[in-house]
Image (cartoon, rainbow, N blue to C red):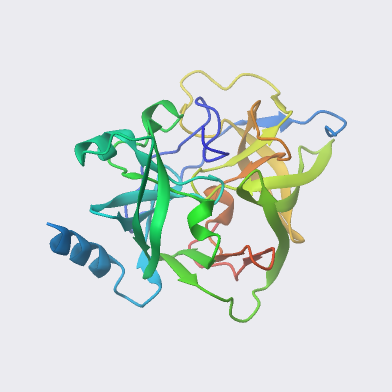
Amino acid sequence: MPGMATPPHTLNGSPGLTPGDDGRKRTRAEQVRLPPHPPTGRGLILALILAAGAARAGETGCWLDHGAIVVPAAFGDIAGDFLLDAATPKSALHVTVANSFGVTSETMRADLRLAGARLPAFEMKVADLDVQARPRTAGLAGVIGADALAGYVTEITTAPCRVKLTRRAGRPWPVRAQMRWVGGAMAVKAAVSDGPTSRAGWFAVATGAPGVTVAQATLTRDPPTGADPDWPPARLRALSIGGLIFEQVPAGATADAPAGLSGAIGEEVWHGRPLRLDPRHGRLELGAKTSDSH
């Protein structure tokens, strides 16, 4: 599994979403219980992609698919839809897509074009994303990870869904939290609570996953029979980021968080507020709440 792009297999994903329909799902679920003590035709292809992001230089449309941000991009001659995930350290090209273009090596270098930006000779690994806990892989060309976003300020809004890349941030947004690199992933300082217990730590900024995953946590009881396996099965009492508190957040437990991470925070949390990632200055910012948020 690349970084914290998705929670474990039984917890990842969410209902399929289409552009213009946020399709957000409210599920009854059990509370997460934390341990009492925290652990120490090239021209045509490119023209289509550029047209998809032609609303403004440095910006492109996006959409939510299974609770994750998906963007149109071009990697060399390969144009398609890519998962955008700041929690994935290394960008990856789906092996099936790579093979269809005659690529049989473990890595590939090509120009990456995304949201008006061009990264020359960018390297992606070639991986079988079908076996990496990604039920939504079908139809996706790959994953654009934190390595592609490192040199930019990334802004993501979901009403409507837009991704913007710039070299410097504009005026400060209302909520600001500390962000740093942990294991190659962008991570934010946050605190979680199940009510009786709480924990603070570094959580990967998972724009490619729906809910929150918490390391060293357990469910109070098994999910009900017939529960959607692609949606986080539990809820956290509270999550705090930069002084902003989110309540009853969809969540699940994970046993394989990378070293230094207490889990991951997914798009269900970021949805409804513009999100700005500024790795150069170590800042994550959230804008004012949008009208479609809950």
Q: Is residue 159 left or right of residue 171?
A: left
- Residue at image location 41% in from the left, 55% down from the top: 122
Residue 32 seen in render: yes
Front residue of 87/293: it is 87
Residue 23 seen in render: no
The percent position of residue 156, horizontal first and vertical second, equals 49, 63
Look at the picture and state if 170 lies above or below 147.
below
Q: In this view, does 264 lie to the left or right of 66?
A: right
* Residue furthest right as drawn: 37
Q: In which quarter of the image is residue 263?
A: top right
Front residue of 69/294: it is 69
* Residue furthest bottom as drawn: 171
Looking at the figure, which quarter contains the C terminus? bottom right
Q: In this view, does 48 lie to the left or right of 192?
A: left
Look at the picture and state if 266 lies above or below 10.
below
The percent position of residue 169, horizontal first and vertical second, equals 59, 76
Look at the picture and state if 210 lies above or below 57.
above
- Residue at image location 52% in from the left, 53% down from the top: 147
- Residue at image location 27% in from the left, 34% down from the top: 96
Mark count: 0
Front residue of 37/108: it is 108
Q: Quadrant of residue 31?
A: top right
Q: Is residue 245 left or right of residue 222?
A: right
The percent position of residue 172, horizontal first and vertical second, equals 66, 77
- Residue at image location 54% in from the left, 65% down from the top: 151
